[in-house]
Image (cartoon, rainbow, N blue to C red):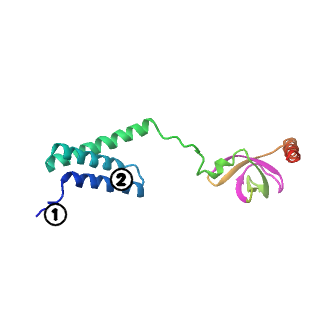
């Protein structure tokens, strides 16, 4: 006894395609969508050509493989560019920012304060209270260099000028 006797085959394929598309939205991975497309196309071809079950399965598998490999090749050749490539790289976003040493650098490592956060940092030996510029990151450890006193004075002068204009 066939459990699908009361259903038209094309509606079954279209329903499977819509279920796979919904699953792709719930569990993103850019794979189920190609199976969903193949199932919907198989359903439309079955509706138009009244295909037998073995033909439907062959068409579904063929379209699935073609769609998945074509999409893979297309995405490999034209990758999606992020509008913010440093989105999940907090240390990388801090490059170029100024910070203050909160724990003296001895042996090349210490702690700095940037904003309301303290970070482990590596750089030359420095004393507490000295200003540093963040030049890079290695995981959660920031790489810093000392800021010359003249540059610090220029920064404070420009901040004072912008405050007086406000």
User: Does residue 116 show up?
Assistant: yes
Total residue callouts:
2
Residue visible at 70% across and 57% down in the picture = 120
Name the residue tied to disc 2: 21
Tell me where residue 26 sits by quadrant. Answer: bottom left
Residue 131 among those drawn in magenta:
yes
Q: The residue tagged with tag 2: helix, strand or loop?
A: helix
* Residue 25 as seen in the image, left or right of residue 149: left
Residue 114 screen position, x and y as percent: 74, 55
Q: Which residue is outermost to the top?
A: 77
Q: Which residues are magenta?
A: 117-138
> Residue beneath label 1, please?
3
Residue shown at 41%/55% (left/top)? 25
Image position, residue 10 (x, y; %): 21, 51
Q: Decide: is 4 above or below 164.
A: below
Coordinates of residue 39 in the picture (x, y in percent)? 27, 49
What is the magenta segment's predominant secondary structure?
A: strand
At label 1, counting other C-alpha atoms closer than 10 Å, the crowd grade (few under 14, some 14-19, many 20 or more) is: few
Disc with the residue nearer the chain's start (2 vs 1): 1
Q: Are marks 2 and 1 in contact (CB under 8 Å)?
A: no
């Amino acid at each position: 006894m066939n459990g699908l006797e009361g259903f038209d085959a094309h509606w079954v394929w279209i329903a499977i395609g819509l279920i796979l598309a919904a699953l792709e939205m719930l569990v993103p991975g850019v794979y189920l969508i190609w199976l969903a497309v193949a199932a919907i196309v198989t359903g439309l071809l079955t509706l138009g050509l009244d295909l037998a079950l073995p033909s439907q399965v062959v068409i579904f598998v063929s379209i699935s493989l073609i769609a998945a490999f074509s999409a893979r090749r297309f995405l490999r050749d034209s990758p999606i560019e992020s509008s913010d490539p440093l989105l999940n790289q907090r240390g990388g976003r801090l490059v170029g920012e100024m910070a203050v040493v909160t724990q003296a650098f001895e042996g090349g490592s210490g702690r700095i304060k940037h904003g309301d956060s303290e970070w482990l940092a590596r750089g030359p030996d420095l004393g507490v209270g000295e200003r540093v510029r963040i030049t890079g990151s290695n995981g959660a450890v920031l790489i810093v260099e000392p800021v010359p006193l003249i540059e610090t004075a220029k920064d404070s002068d420009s901040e004072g000028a912008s405050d007086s204009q406000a």
